[in-house]
Image (spheres, rainbow, N blue to C red):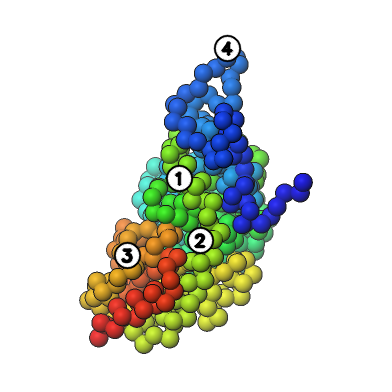
Amino acid sequence: MKKTKSIATLVIHAGDQVDRGNNAIFPPITTASSFIQPNLGEEGEFCYSRCSNPTRYAYETALAELEGGTYATATASGMAATALILELLPKDSHVLVMHGVYGGTYRLFERLRKQTSGTTFSYIDLNDLEAVNNHIQENTRLIWIETPTNPLLELVDIEAVCQVARARKVMTCVDNTFASAWNQRPLILGADIVMLSTSKYIGGHSDLIGGAVITNVHNIAEQLDFCKTTVGAIASPFDAYLALRGMKTLDVRMDRQCSNALKIAHFLEQHPKVLDVHYPGLESHPQHQLCKKQMRSGGAVVSIRLKGDITEVKTFISKLNYFVLAESLGGVESMVNHSASMSHGSMSKEEKENIGIYDTTLRLSIGIEDINDLKDDLDQALSFIQ
């Protein structure tokens, strides 16, 4: 039977989810730290849970197939996944990075890896292919693509950048957290690695912390497996179970969330209290055509800049009923995030403003609630702004 390419089917049936013990309809949580071996030199399918675990294996194989990869490793967090990828690089490597990346990524790069491994980072607009070519150095080993970026939702032409990277023999990684495989599949577009914070759309219920690294390149898979086993920043069986359970409804959740987000973006674009709306699904977005080319929709995040100052922001947030103020995104509930003090709080004011993040910038993660309730909630909260 020919394997399906349908995301709606893959989120439920992808990978090897067979329970070899009891044929349970859903893989059980196996908490064992180690597994009994028949005899010396006769290791079974599983040996030690840092290396592999039945629950994590079911989840990892499902993730790999969902993203169009051949190998996945589930990590303890999205940042652990990012750090694991950097373990692939030799000391004193150079990395090209999309400007405006997530604040946690920037913090790891600038305040840790620069000091501990001598890795250097250049932040540029990766859509400027001439600049990409010019910035590739003799020691450039990786191009880090975040698309859409957090929180301003800038896009990167994945296929175009990967073509340049391949010609220069540089590895590429795409942070696909904001899109998930439902919205775009970077490995199919030519990327070597996909990184995910599975705490977001994969889990989808704000009840786990997790990350993942997926590839379809054999030698990268071998290196990742060695690094994963050596470093040990793995997802627990329980978190793997939660993420796999959440993944089952990824299609229906994303369909509602992205549909809601487009309507919210249209609504806010016309609102007199909103200065800017960032959403690639809008025709007014400067990269709307790229969005149509490589994404299924504009995504489920809408970022805005309110008129006024931080006082208006506090008033607006305090009046919201359904949008909850929270650090994360991607859950079934709608959330508001103050980017300057939360997701990018570790950056200086100058660094934030350099990439377009101000005290009045807010990231809205749109949930699955009734669209009219969400619009009414935003409208009444905005009415309190002078």
Q: Amino acid at mark 3?
A: Val
Q: Nearer the viewer, mark 3 or mark 4?
A: 3
Q: Residues within 10 Å of mark 1 (few under 14, many from 20)?
A: many
**Is 242 rendered above or below residue 284?**
above
**Mark 3 highlights which residue?**
324
SS at mark 4 in the image: loop
- Residue 377 visible in rendering: yes
Q: CB under 8 Å between callouts 4 and 2?
A: no
Q: Residue at x 34, y 84 (%)?
A: 273
Check whether the beta carbons of the residues at disc 3 and disc 4 lie within 8 A of each other: no
Tell me which label, 2 or 3, sits earlier in the chain: 2
Q: Which residue is mark 2?
A: 253
Mark 4: amino acid? Asn
Q: Pick whichever of labels 3 and 4 is earlier in the sequence.
A: 4
Q: Label 1: state its secondary structure.
A: helix
Q: Does 238 sit above or below residue 43?
A: below
Name the residue tied to disc 1. 242
Horizontal and vertical percent for residue 270? 43, 86
Closer to the camera in the image, 222 or 266: 266
